[in-house]
Image: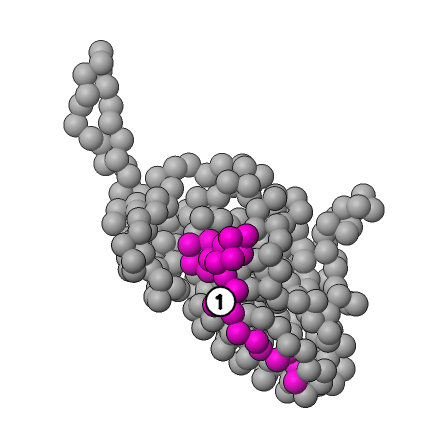
Amino acid sequence: MAVSRRTVLGAVLAPVILPRPAAAEAGLARLVAAYPDHLAGLDGDVLVWTDGTRMETGAGRPERPFDVMLRDATLADQLRQAYPAGPPAGPPGRNHSPGRIRSTAFFVKMYGDCRRGGAGRRHRTVTWMPQTRPQPLPVTMDNDVATRLERVIAELERLPDRLKAYLVPSAGTFNCRTVADTGLLSMHAYAAAVDIAVAHSDYWSWARARGDIRYRNRIPFAIAEVFEAQRFIWGGKWYHYDTMHFEYRPELIDGA
């Protein structure tokens, strides 16, 4: 519940309790459940970490324009767009890019800040597509992401050979870099994302350079389905499409 104070002629009246929207309530509960190694629970509109750190969620604030949330997201903003698990029903609606809105403070706290050397010690090497074209990739051990990616790889290796061209070589996992259009850290900076092969991939920013960002995808959903089973979301379901990109975001896919 959010609390507001009303004043009459300068006098402070009793607090008025404003109900937190049910969607925000459910989203924050999913967030806590999705990261049990790090999150202890909620105290009103405050997220409590297992180490006692308290972080404002912004749940009582109104929704802001997409471009504003994209560059300055609260935790509540991060949960506003639902990720549509399962086969795509069609191109995403304008600005519907569930997962692109991220609270940098939240992910830096969880995975470490690569700009300050606070992430690499929590990585381990995962072998991408070991039977097809082995490639070592650093992946975070937090939230069992490395183990989950290994499960993904095992299932990908079982797919028909005709699909392997979409997968190898991987375009990478860990990269201490920012997202070009926001200047904020990418999920690659936390080693919690993987890009599959570039050859058959499409990216909205490449299209923007040509003056046209109409939706485009050539990646078979059979590949994305394997990732979704381990709670990775796919950039191929974004208006700002990035069809090679998968990132571990259980708080979104658990609610889909």
Position of residue 108 measured from the top left corner of the image (x, y, whole percent): 46, 53
Position of residue 223 measured from the top left corner of the image (x, y, whole percent): 64, 74
**To which quarter of the image does residue 135 belong?**
bottom right
Work out whether 254 lies above or below 208.
Answer: below
Q: Is residue 18 left or right of residue 135?
A: left
Q: Can residue 239 be seen?
A: no
Q: Name the kind of residue labelled 1 in the image.
A: Arg
Find the magenta span and give its range: 108-130
| Numbered label tally | 1
Work out whether 199 lies above or below 69.
Answer: below
* Residue at image coords 35%, 39%: 60
| Colouring of the image | one colour
- Pick whichever, 37 or 45, lies toward us: 37
**To which quarter of the image does residue 109 belong?**
bottom left
**To which quarter of the image does residue 216 belong?**
bottom right
Residue lying at the far left in this picture: please name it. Answer: 14
* Residue at image coords 71%, 85%: 132
Read off the residue under disc 1.
Answer: 121
Position of residue 238 measured from the top left corner of the image (x, y, whole percent): 62, 55
